[in-house]
Amino acid sequence: MTELVDGIRAGLRAAADPERAPRMQAYMKSAMPFLGVPSPAVRSITGAVRREHPPADLDELRAAVLDLWDAATYREERYAAQNLLRYRLGTGDPALLPLHEHIAVTGAWWDHVDETAHRIADLHDAHPADTAAVVRAWSRGGNLWLRRLAIISQLGRKDRLDTDLLTDVIEPALPESEFFLRKAIGWALREHAKTDPEWVRAYVTAHEDRLSGLSRREALKHL
């Protein structure tokens, strides 16, 4: 997958904007520098190179993603690695769960975790029982970013969302003061309120004394 990875790196560097890069790094509070390539351009570059040098199978996809991710010197390379996982070859395959976990743990920031949540949502649809068991374990573990990932892992599932699972993954985070967990709880509930507002109202009422003010405000924001 050298041609795929090298092509993406070259494309990103060709699109670099040194004036934009410091602002992007400051906004994301990132220790890793930016090239200054906007997200739409990262997606466009990744897609174009992938069409020219498509991975033949899951192993090649995994290798390319890991190369881009682990050897990244600029944050856009990590965004490109995650973009490669958007395509059909990597969608809903449980063999990639360790890779998604690796990205969340080593990325250790909301932008990488929130993007990974889409891939876990695909897995919920393709392998609901096995994926539910994994995210329940994440929600009770010691890693903040896996706990956040567990809470937001059903975003976008609408009427396919498993409310018992959502309740279970929120439960361990209810006593926590951590902003990223409280925000995740509110976000997950707010999104589900678009599909089932009565369920969300009932949940908030039942947990009134345990939900943080932030989580409650987010959950009820559009109700």
Image: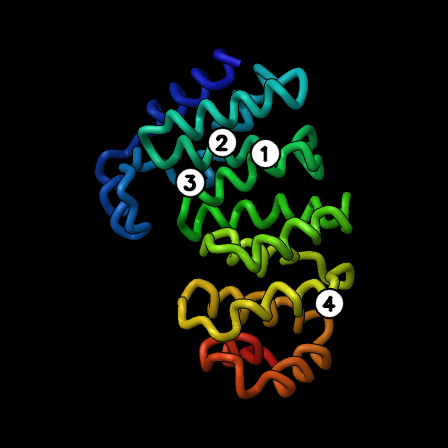
Amino acid type at image mark 4: Asp
**Residue under label 2:** 81
Q: Secondary structure at mark 2?
A: helix
Residue at point 46%, 44% (across, down): 105
The reply to whether the C-beta atoms of the residues labelled 4 and 2 are less than 8 Å apart is no
Amino acid type at image mark 3: Thr
Q: Residues within 10 Å of mark 3 (few under 14, many from 20)?
A: few
Q: Secondary structure at mark 3?
A: helix
Vertical arrangement, residue 3 with respect to residue 135, above or below: above
Question: Which label lies toward us, 2 or 3?
Answer: 3
**Residue under label 3:** 106
**Which residue lies most toward the top here?**
3
Answer with mark 4 or mark 3, whichever residue precedes in sequence.
3
**Residue under label 4:** 164
Q: Residues within 10 Å of mark 2 (few under 14, many from 20)?
A: many
Instruction: State the CA–CA distance, disc 1 to disc 2.
Output: 7 Å
Answer with mark 2 or mark 3, whichever residue precedes in sequence.
2
Vertical arrangement, residue 212 with respect to residue 46, above or below: below
Amino acid type at image mark 2: Ala
Q: Residue 15 at what x, y percent from top left?
A: 35, 28
The disc label shown at residue 85, or none: 1
Residue 53 is drawn in which quadrant? top right
Judged left or right of residue 137, residue 76 is left
Q: Residue 54 at what x, y percent from top left?
A: 61, 18
Q: Secondary structure at mark 4?
A: helix
The reply to whether the C-beta atoms of the residues labelled 1 and 2 are less than 8 Å apart is yes
Amino acid type at image mark 1: Leu
